[in-house]
Image (cartoon, grey):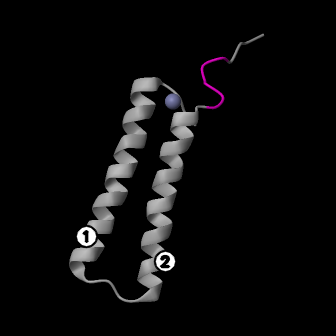
Amino acid sequence: MTRTRCRVLSCAEHEGLEFELLDVRTRGQYLTRLRSLTREEQAEWGRREQRALASLVDHELEHGCNG
Ligand SMILES: [Zn+2]
């Protein structure tokens, strides 16, 4: 028999960060559909998404959780 207990089942903080990333992506896509964004705006949304993704990855590394 093998024990598999290496994963935290649910982490509220992780969920929150995941939601933030999804939110940034969704809003960026929504804006793009409404009108064409300028290059600066596209870059800004890209940075926001990168930041959200970085926080999520940082959290996973520090906390050792996986969603
Ligand atoms: Zn966590």
**Mark identifier at residue 20:** none
* Residue 13 at x, y percent in the picture: 52, 35
Single out the mark in the foreground, 1 or 2.
2
Q: Which residues are magenta?
A: 5-10
Residue receiving disc 2: 30
Three-letter code for the amino acid on which mark 2 is drawn: Tyr
- Please tell me whether the stretch drawn in magenta is mainly helix, strand or loop: loop
Amino acid identity at mark 1: Ala
Asked if ligand 1 lies within 8 A of label 1, the reply is no
Q: Is residue 8 magenta?
A: yes
Q: Earlier in the sequence, mark 1 or mark 2?
A: 2
Give the position of the C terminus as an image quadrant. top right
How many dots with numbers?
2
Structural crowding at the residue carrying mark 1, measured as other residues with C-alpha within 10 Å and reported as few (<14), some (14–19) or many (≥20)? few
The quadrant holding residue 9 is top right
Residue 17, how many percent across, how many down?
Answer: 48, 44
CB atoms at circles 1 and 2 under 8 Å apart? Answer: no
**Considering the numbered disc 2 on the image, is that residue within a helix, a strand or a loop?**
helix
Is 24 on the left or on the right of 67, as rendered?
left
Give the SS element for disc 1.
helix
Number of the label disc, if any, that sits on residue 43: 1
Marks 1/2: CA–CA distance: 15 Å
Vertical placement of 8 versus 29: above or below? above
User: In this view, which residue lies farthest toward the top?
Assistant: 1
> Which residue is found at the position 47% from the left and 52% from the top?
20
Left or right of 15 in this view: 40: left
Q: Between 66 and 38, which is closer to the camera in this rendering?
A: 38
The residue shown at (78%, 10%) is 1
* Quarter residue 42 falls in: bottom left
Q: Which residue is located at x 46 percent, y 64 percent? A: 25
